[in-house]
Amino acid sequence: MSKVSLKSLSQHLGLAEGTVSRAINGYPDISERTRERVRRAVVELGYRPNSNARRLATGNAECVGYVLPWRQGHISDPFLGEMLDGLSAALAERHWDLTISVPRSEEDELAIITRLAESGRVNGIVLSRTLIRDRRVECVRALGIPFVTHGRTGNSDDHAWFDIDNFAAFREAVHHLAGLGHARIACIHGRLDYNFATQRWMGFQQGLKDCGLELVPGYKAQSKMNQDGGSWAMMDLMQLKRPPTAVVCVSDLVAVGAMKAIREAGMRPGREISVIGYDGLLLGEHTDPPLTTMAYPVHETGRTIGEMLLAAIDGAKPSDNQQLRRAELLRRESDGPPPAA
């Protein structure tokens, strides 16, 4: 079946091509009666408008920009993969596109954001892995383009954001380990200029306090947001005179690295040292042993962020476009009681 053109659609209706085009694109100078005639003919004939022509005519890019966080992001990161899949799914339902940019430095990141906004190639921007003081947020605010952050900053009242209650999640993880009998609990955290990392670290400390436990000197290790970082941090913890019997990790990817280091030291995660991750990524089902984690639906998070950005583009107030969700403990096999003394 041949593709229906604007010309053939117009001939079928007995209208000028310009009139049909303006009816399809919602111009107010076209009567409702004519728009309805055109809508019926579009369905009847199966006409599909040229997206590039439509975007040119309406000045609507129908595209959203995602700029990979340069310091911690990598396109192969399974967390980003799951989140971006959900984001693109939400956009696809409105026939919008997603453009992903990979910066090489912080200045390059800001330059890409500025270029995307000023070029008109995107209608909105998604930012993730937010800092307490985030220059990217300051940049998009100044540019006046709609945006949503995945995570809060030190001042998020005036823009749309989606976040998980990081404080509550790490507090619950400590409560769980203490309930299993652990007293020597360590934390592998991320860089503390990241807002999520600080929230998780504070929740960890509060969990210890709730359970009447002290933070043992040395039971705190910083890691990059990848497996290698988790391995190195775990090796440092295992070299202590009295190593921890449990560790809470800033992410599933870091936890996978920590478990690798434990196995290489001749021990079994969940037996000699319990490990809890954070994110609930699918990869955690296939680790050795399967990873216990503070889980939330990462794919659905991406979808929600996409819907929130579309709402922001449509004019939603920031105060009505902010969501805080909870993570839940997902027990698999990497946690258990501490080994007998």
Image (cartoon, rainbow, N blue to C red):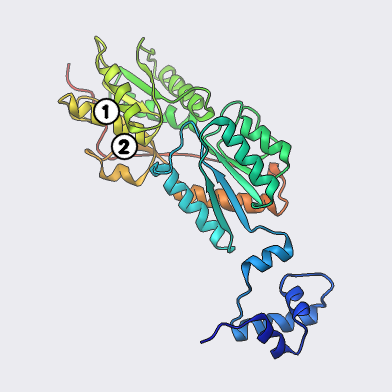
**107 versus 207 height, above or below:** below
Task: Give residue 126's quadrant in the image.
Answer: top right
Can I make out residue 40 in this image?
A: yes
Give the image location of residue 123, x and y in percent.
Answer: 66, 52
Q: Which residue is mark 1?
A: 274
Q: Position of residue 128 (x, y in %)?
A: 54, 38
User: Mark 1: which secondary structure?
Assistant: strand
Residue 292 marker: 2
User: Which is nearer the eye, 76 or 328?
Assistant: 76
Residue type of the residue flagged with mark 1: Ser
Asked which secondary structure carries label 2, the reply is: strand
Comparing 315 with 25, the one in front is 25
Q: Are marks 1 and 2 in contact (CB under 8 Å)?
A: yes
What residue appears at the point 80 percent right and 77 percent down from the top-left corner?
Answer: 32
Residue 49 in percent (x, y) is at 63, 74
Q: State the residue at coordinates (31%, 42%).
A: 284
Horizontally, is 257 left or right of 171 in the view?
A: left
State the mark number for residue 99: none
**Residue displayed at 39% across by 13% down:** 215
Q: In screen coordinates, is 211 left or right of 122? A: left
Crowding near the residue tagged with mark 1, few <14, some 14–19, many ≥20 C-alpha atoms within 10 Å? many
Which residue is outermost to the left?
266
Q: Earlier in the sequence, mark 1 or mark 2?
A: 1
Q: Residue 60's image quarter?
A: bottom right
Image coordinates of residue 23 in percent, x first then y, are 75, 75
What is the distance, in whole Å, between disc 1 and disc 2 at their CAs? 9 Å
